[in-house]
Amino acid sequence: MFITREELQTAIYEYQVADIIGGDVDDIAVRHAVAAAVSEASSYLNAKYDIRAIFSARGDDRHPLLVEHVKSIAVWYIIKRANTDIIFERAKEYYKAAIDWLRLVAGIGTENETIAPDLPLRRHDRGDGSGVATRLRFGSHPKFDHGLDDATPFKHPLIGLNRE
């Protein structure tokens, strides 16, 4: 797993997890919450970043801010089952902050506003290991029109030109 139950203790107390999952010995609820959190984070990062490399990393090889945000999302999925001694609004706020951060990283819903954490970029499968798979945006501003029509002759003499 990308995040262990022990690592979740920095985001939610163990007694709260125990109260919510109700003595689930196999930690199915916790594993499901972490898997859902990783899946949600992956859905934002998939278009631009190598999510296999990101989420297969362990220990200190993981991006620390991404770990914190995935923990916040996992806590959200855990407390959806029952609100035990947790300020629901605070968990909701952390969840929203995590999603907003993922949207900024992915460049979703923003105009030229993005952040670039040190995450491995997605690559093409060409076999030679080259070619970063990123989206390229190009275009121009709309054509500027002065309102002059080509069919209408210019009626005003220009100053400084030969006048007759």
Image: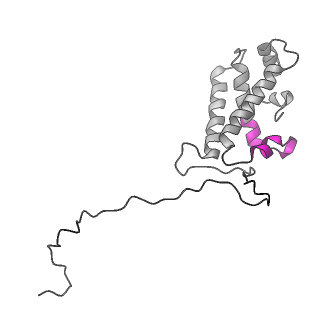
> What is the x, y in percent for residue 105?
64, 46
> What is the x, y in percent for residue 145?
30, 62
Q: Can residue 102 be seen in the rendering of this structure?
A: yes
- The residue drawn where x is 70% and y is 49% is 117
Q: How does the figure colour the protein chain or chains? A: one colour
Depth check: give the residue in front, 52 or 79: 52
- The residue drawn where x is 75% and y is 57% is 126
Numbered range of the magenta stretch: 48-69
Q: Can residue 12 be seen in the rendering of this structure?
A: no
> What is the x, y in percent for residue 129?
79, 59
Task: Name, please, the residue furthest toward the top.
Answer: 22
Placement of 104 over or under 163, stated as above or below = above
Placement of 18 over or under 143, stated as above or below = above
Q: Quadrant of residue 12?
A: top right
Task: Please give the count of numbered marks on the rendered protein.
Answer: 0
Residue 104 placement, left or right of 145: right
Instruction: Name the image quarter holding the C terminus.
Output: bottom left
Depth check: give the residue in front, 101 or 138: 138
> Dominant secondary structure of the magenta stretch?
helix
- The residue drawn where x is 48% and y is 59% is 139
Is residue 65 inside the magenta stretch? yes
> What is the x, y in percent for residue 102?
65, 40
Instruction: Name the image quarter holding the N terminus.
Output: top right
Task: Name, please, the residue furthest toward the front.
Answer: 126
Is residue 55 inside the magenta stretch? yes
- The residue drawn where x is 59% and y is 46% is 107
Residue 109 placement, left or right of 88: left
Placement of 13 over or under 98, stated as above or below = above
Residue 23 placement, left or right of 113: right
